[in-house]
Image (cartoon, grey):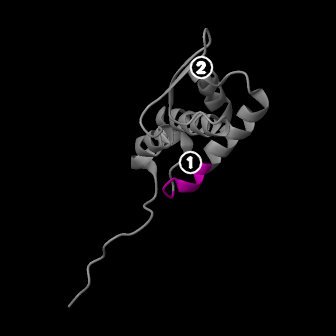
Amino acid sequence: MTERVLELVRALGGAGQEDALGALCAAACGALDRRLREGVTAQDCGDAYPLAAAWLALDWLRGSRGLEGVTALSAGDISVRREGGGDGGGLSERAWELMGPFLADEGFAFQGVKG
């Protein structure tokens, strides 16, 4: 699955950092695997899994380059545009949202109490 994620990251704009990409893709797959519901595999998630892992890896790569929140980058006469106060991990948030149906519940949950 990591190879498929690596292909997506390259296609989505992460080419050129081959040393880092392999490790980032493997880490993204590991992060997703740890949060999958019991009995759910990466293959059960269809295309959502490799896309979410690619988004996580790209977000981490952007963060390591100091490019969080960058929405446009030009080379001629150099121009960088940032939205608001930054993206705030937008790709990571989208990745976890996409994987929501396949992930185990985490955090706080209400439970009924007999009175």
Q: Secondary structure at mark 2?
A: helix
Which residue is identified by label 1? 32
Q: Nearer the viewer, mark 2 or mark 1?
A: 2
Which residue is identified by label 2? 11
Furthest toward the top, the residue is 76
Which residue is depicted at the point 68% across and 21% down?
Answer: 15
| Residue range of the region highlighted in magenta in the rendering | 31-38
**Neighbours of disc 2 within 10 Å: few (<14), some (14-19), many (20+):** few
Q: Amino acid at mark 1?
A: Leu
Q: Amino acid at mark 2?
A: Ala
Q: Looking at the image, do the residues carrying marks 2 and 1 touch, with CB atoms under 8 Å apart? A: no
- Per the picture, the main secondary structure of the magenta-coloured stretch is helix
The x and y percentages for residue 113 are 26, 84
The x and y percentages for residue 101 are 39, 48
The x and y percentages for residue 86 are 48, 38
Q: Is residue 109 magenta?
A: no
Q: Secondary structure at mark 1?
A: helix
